[in-house]
Image (cartoon, helix red, strand yellow):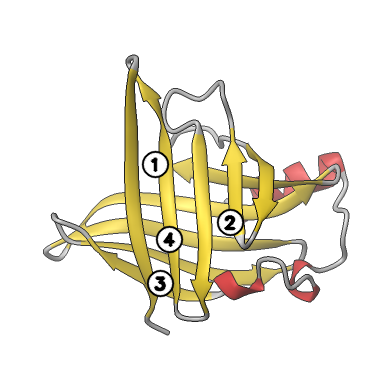
Amino acid sequence: MKKLVFMLALGFGCVEAQIANDTTFNWLVGKWEAQTKEGKFFEYWSASDCMLEAQGGELVKKDTVFKEWLTLTKIKNYWCYIPIVGKQAPIVFALKESKNRIFIFENKEHDFPQQIIYEFINANHFKARVEGKMKGKEMKELYEMKRVE
């Protein structure tokens, strides 16, 4: 996964030497979890080179039922959120709007979600939302993320 995103960054040119020096998204670094009806949703973020990277997923009992790799990086002056779910190809969501510590990433061509929204609440809490249309029906999923480490 790292190699794929690194190749993307090289192909488009890494805008900044280190994302870690940019405080815009540094608050994400760490381990985050949210309780769901089924179990526990998690995102474990770290900073490296030109990007932030995370492993995300959902645990039901002791089984991982959903797993994804996440990257947050700048490509040609645009912040991009890039999830890779399972063996699927990476999907690029470009930062559409950022104000009051709410970050809206969008890809209108994706089946679901079309938007991924991160809302910084404080150093130990953020909200993550995925939303859009699926088969013509509006859908939303909300995760109340709490820092665990």
- Return the residue found at the far top: 136
Q: Earlier in the sequence, mark 4 or mark 1?
A: 1
Label of residue 14 in the image: none
Q: Is residue 113 above or below residue 77?
A: above
Q: Nearer the viewer, mark 3 or mark 1?
A: 3
Contact flag, marks 3 and 2 (Cβ < 8 Å): no
- Mark with earlier residue (3, 1): 3
Image position, residue 124 (x, y; %): 45, 80
**Dot 4 lies on which element?**
strand
Using the image, determine if residue 32 lies above or below residue 86. Answer: below
Q: Which mark is residue 86?
A: 1
- Residue drawn at the location 52% of the way across and 56% of the way down: 118
Of badges 2 and 1, nearer the viewer stands: 2
Q: Secondary structure at mark 3?
A: strand
Q: Position of residue 125 (x, y in %)?
A: 43, 74
Circle 4: residue type: Lys
- What type is the residue that disc 3 sits on? Trp
* Label 3 sits on residue: 32
Helix, strand or loop under label 2: strand
Report the mark closest to the observer, 4 or 1. Answer: 4
Q: CA distance from mark 4 to mark 1?
A: 23 Å
Query: Decide: marks 3, 4 in contact (CB < 8 A)?
Result: no
Task: Using the numbered discs, state the Cα–Cα distance from disc 3 to disc 2 in whole angstroms.
Answer: 17 Å
Give the amino acid type for the residue marked by disc 2 in the picture: Ile
Mark 4 vs 1: CB contact within 8 A = no
How far is mark 4 from mark 2, CA to CA? 9 Å
Query: Mark 3 to mark 4: distance in Å?
Result: 11 Å
Task: Name the residue rendered at 17%, 61% in the picture.
Answer: 39
Name the side, left or right, on which 10 lies relative to 130. right
* Residue sitting nearer the eye, 120 or 53: 120
> Measuring 45% from the left and 60% from the top, which residue is drawn there?
55
Give the residue drawn at x 49%, y 52%: 69
